Image (cartoon, grey):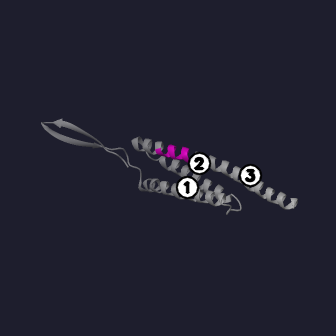
Amino acid sequence: MVEARLRREQSRGGARVRVHSEPQPGPAVRSAHARAPGRCRLHNAELTHNVLLARAGLLSNYDSLTEAGQALRATLQALDRESEAASGDTARDIRHHADALADALEEKLILVEYFKSDNALLRNSSANFSRAGQVAR
């Protein structure tokens, strides 16, 4: 969205409105910016879904977690590249929101890495505990 600045000038007793706007990004850039949040939500939901499956023991490996994380990072990188085409206030707004989104997603990806380590330790410990119990009988 490009916001126009309006300035009223008094001329000869009447008001005249001048519209000053910043250059608008092309349709392809606007379209890509509109799709990026949806792609982030999709990959974020996929990541969350796969974390829950892994926690329930329904995933045999963590490849899908890694792939979803890579897809999130690729989407953020694409958003960064596309936002470079914007200028002025629009670019500042996009950059601010894109940076906040990137920070939140990076934090989530770090937590997913911790989860993978903790969950692998739990699964291995449970398997070893079961084997030790069978040997003791």
Dot 3 alpha-carbon crowd within 10 angstroms: few under 14, some 14 to 19, many 20 or more: few
Alpha-carbon span between mark 3 and mark 1: 24 Å
- Residue 123 located within the stretch drawn in magenta: no
For badge 2, the amino acid type reads: Lys
Q: Residue at x 55, y 44 (%)?
A: 103
Q: Are marks 2 and 3 in contact (CB under 8 Å)?
A: no
The residues bearing labels 1 and 2 have C-alpha atoms spaced at a distance of 9 Å
Q: Amino acid at mark 1?
A: Asn
Pointer 3 residue: 121
Q: Nearer the viewer, residue 116 or 18?
A: 116
Gap in angstroms between the C-alphas marked 2 and 3: 20 Å
Q: Disc 2 or 3, which lies upstream in sequence?
A: 2
Q: Quadrant of residue 27?
A: bottom left
SS at badge 2: helix
Q: Earlier in the sequence, mark 3 or mark 1?
A: 1
Front in this rendered view, residue 36 or 133: 133
The relative height of residue 131 versus residue 20 in the rendered view (above or below) is below
- Residue 121 against residue 89 in the figure, above or below: below
The span shown in magenta is: 97-105
Q: Circle 2 sits on which residue?
A: 108
Left or right of residue 83, residue 121 in this image:
right
Residue at 40% in and 41% down: 89
Please give the name of the residue rendered at 46% of the width and 47% of the height, measured from the top-left corner: 85
Q: Quadrant of the C terminus?
A: bottom right
Q: Position of residue 16 (x, y in %)?
A: 19, 41
What percent of the width, then of the height, locates residue 82?
49, 50
Q: Which mark is residue 53?
A: none
